[in-house]
Image (cartoon, rainbow, N blue to C red):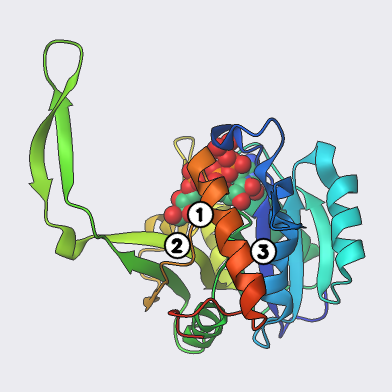
Amino acid sequence: MRGSNDTVAVVLAGGIGSRAGLGHPKQFAVLAGRTLLERTVARFERSEAVDGILVLIAPDHIDRAERILKEAGFAKIAGVVPGGEQRSDSTRAALDRIAADGGAAKVLVHDAARPFVPDRVIREAVGALDDRDAVNVVDPVTDTLVTVRDDGEGGEAPAEVVDRSAVRRVQTPQGFRFPVLAEAYRLAAGDPDFRATDDCSVVMRYLPEARIAVIAGDPWNMKVTGPADVLVADLIAARLDETGTGALGGESE
Ligand SMILES: Nc1ccn([C@@H]2O[C@H](COP(=O)(O)OP(=O)(O)OP(=O)(O)O)[C@@H](O)[C@H]2O)c(=O)n1
Ligand SMILES: C[C@](O)(CO)[C@H](O)COP(=O)(O)O
């Protein structure tokens, strides 16, 4: 780690990608010639807003990840650290490592599974932390949303339409002043019911007074989750390489 004034991007690649159905962790999926892991880390390597990059990876795959990152020639890698059982365990492992290495001013926590995060989103997330404790990245919902109920015959029926104008899809990187996220996770450790699918919700739950900004995400900042996403990501990666600029076009770089 470089120093306590730095901004560290935590790339969470500690999962096994069961929903992608590839038979190996999706971070090793090859998208137009480069692994998903390499593509995601490259977004932070090229960002002037980020000083160091910490990669979390499932313990059995550390050697492979280190080889990929070394061959890619990244200069900002601050460590490759074993992830935990759940996503939140991997975040916790990252926080412990950053603290052990002397701390940081700001941390971004990003899904390795989002390989096309635009530079604009990274830059704005880091900038928002100048006067906020945390920042969430959100995108409008374009589908109609319904809640469902048990239909009494073993299936589901639509119950109510949700007002989508008040709902957003959450993306990453989510940003935090490092002491804020560390404190939220310290409080969460004392909660036997703790569960979280992202990191901003940990701050919202355990530090309700925290000042959290929201910035606009980007439709290109997709999450590779299921088999269809792997196919789409492969096509986007090829398009991205064709542009040669690191930008996809349409997003605000
Ligand atoms: N124990 C875990 C679980 C997930 N992640 C990371 O968190 C991101 C979002 O998780 P998800 O998309 O659910 O990835 P997986 O857990 O790998 O996928 P699945 O749930 O399909 O097994 C991914 O980049 C994943 O590698 C992690 O670092 N540690
Ligand atoms: C963090 C996240 O990407 C925000 O939308 C999402 O919660 C991750 O969910 P997953 O089921 O771990 O992919």
Seen from the viewer's position, the closer of residues 148 and 92 is 148
Q: Position of residue 167 (x, y in %)?
A: 23, 60
Q: Which residue is mark 2?
A: 171
Seen from the viewer's position, the closer of residues 13 and 253 is 253
| Sequence-wise first label, 3 or 2 | 3
| Residue at 69 percent of width and 30 percent of height | 23
The response on whether ligand 2 sits within 8 Å of label 2 is: yes
Image quarter in which the N terminus is found: bottom right
| Residue at 42 percent of width and 71 percent of height | 218
| Residue at 52 percent of width and 53 percent of height | 232
Seen from the viewer's position, the closer of residues 100 and 64 is 64
Q: Is residue 12 left or right of residue 75?
A: left
Q: Is residue 38 left or right of residue 122?
A: right
**Labelled pair 3, 2 in contact (Cβ < 8 Å):** no
- The answer to whether residue 172 is above or below residue 15 is below
The response on whether ligand 2 sits within 8 Å of label 1 is: yes
Mark 2 belongs to which amino acid? Gln
The response on whether ligand 1 sits within 8 Å of label 3 is: yes
Label 3, label 2: how far apart the Cα atoms are = 14 Å
User: Tag 1's secondary structure?
Assistant: loop
Q: Position of residue 178 (x, y in %)?
A: 61, 72
Q: Is residue 78 left or right of residue 127?
A: right
| Sequence-wise first label, 2 or 1 | 2
**Labelled pair 2, 1 in contact (Cβ < 8 Å):** yes
User: Tag 3's secondary structure?
Assistant: helix
Mark 1 belongs to which amino acid? Lys
The disc placed on residue 40 is: 3
Q: Which residue is mark 1?
A: 223
| Sequence-wise first label, 3 or 1 | 3
User: Tag 2's secondary structure?
Assistant: strand
